[in-house]
Image: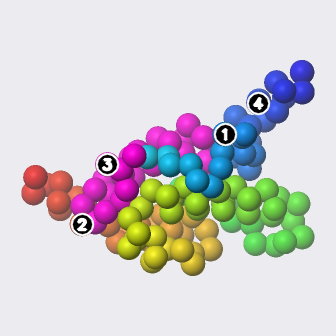
Amino acid sequence: MAANNSTSESTTNSNVTSASDHPGLALVSQLLTSENYSTWSRSIIMALTAKNKLGFIDGTIKRVVDPSDTSYLPWKRCNTMVFSWLLNSVSKEIAGSIIYAESVHDIWEDLKEEFGKIGERYERMR
């Protein structure tokens, strides 16, 4: 029974990681470059939705900043895990520009601002 409860909790609680979640995980096969933001972001959204972690990038899971809050450590652990997944899915040049961000939501918004319009123009030109 406990395993079922654990499995159920991991599929409904975004602040829970599963045994298959690890920092070296590659969520997508294609690294983000300045030319593929549209397809890359769609792939990331699908992968994070499947892992019940989309809220970390879209902002629906709010950043917990108070270390005394009981949800701080679970949030920080999962934010860091998603952060590592994003780092594994971008080019080395892009990784260098996002490594010091505080939250994956901030990273997501920065990447969208930086590459979203470039990617749209590139896709129209093809």
Residue at horizontal 47 percent and vertical 41 percent from the top: 46
Look at label 1 and name its amino acid.
Ser
The alpha-carbon separation of the residues under discs 1 and 3 comes to 25 Å
Question: Residue 71: horizontal and vertical position, in percent?
Answer: 82, 58
The alpha-carbon separation of the residues under discs 2 and 1 comes to 34 Å
Q: For mark 3, does the 10 Å Cα neighbourhood hold few (<14), some (14 to 19), or many (20 or more) residues?
A: some
The first of marks 3 and 4 along the sequence is 4
Q: Is 32 placed left or right of 34 in the picture?
A: right
Judge whether 10 appears above or below 68 on screen. Answer: above
Is there CB contact under 8 Å for labels 1 and 3? no
Q: Nearer the viewer, mark 4 or mark 2?
A: 4
The alpha-carbon separation of the residues under discs 3 and 4 comes to 31 Å
Secondary structure at numbered mark 4: helix
Look at label 2 and name its amino acid.
Ile
The first of marks 2 and 3 along the sequence is 3
In the rendered image, which quarter contains the N terminus?
Answer: top right
Please give the residue where the numbered disc 3 appears in the rendered image: 39
Q: Does the magenta stretch include residue 44?
A: yes
Is there CB contact under 8 Å for labels 2 and 3? no
Please give the residue where the numbered disc 4 appears in the rendered image: 7
Secondary structure at numbered mark 3: helix
Please give the residue where the numbered disc 1 appears in the rendered image: 20
Instruction: Tell me where the magenta segment starts and ends, as one range.
Output: 29-56
The alpha-carbon separation of the residues under discs 4 and 2 comes to 40 Å
Q: Is residue 101 magenta?
A: no
Q: Which mark is drawn over residue 118?
A: 2
Residue at horizontal 55 percent and vertical 55 percent from the top: 85
Q: Which of marks 1 and 3 is in front?
A: 1
Q: Viewer-proximal residue, 98 or 55?
A: 98
Q: For mark 4, does the 10 Å Cα neighbourhood hold few (<14), some (14 to 19), or many (20 or more) residues?
A: few
Question: Residue 41: horizontal and vertical position, in percent?
Answer: 39, 52
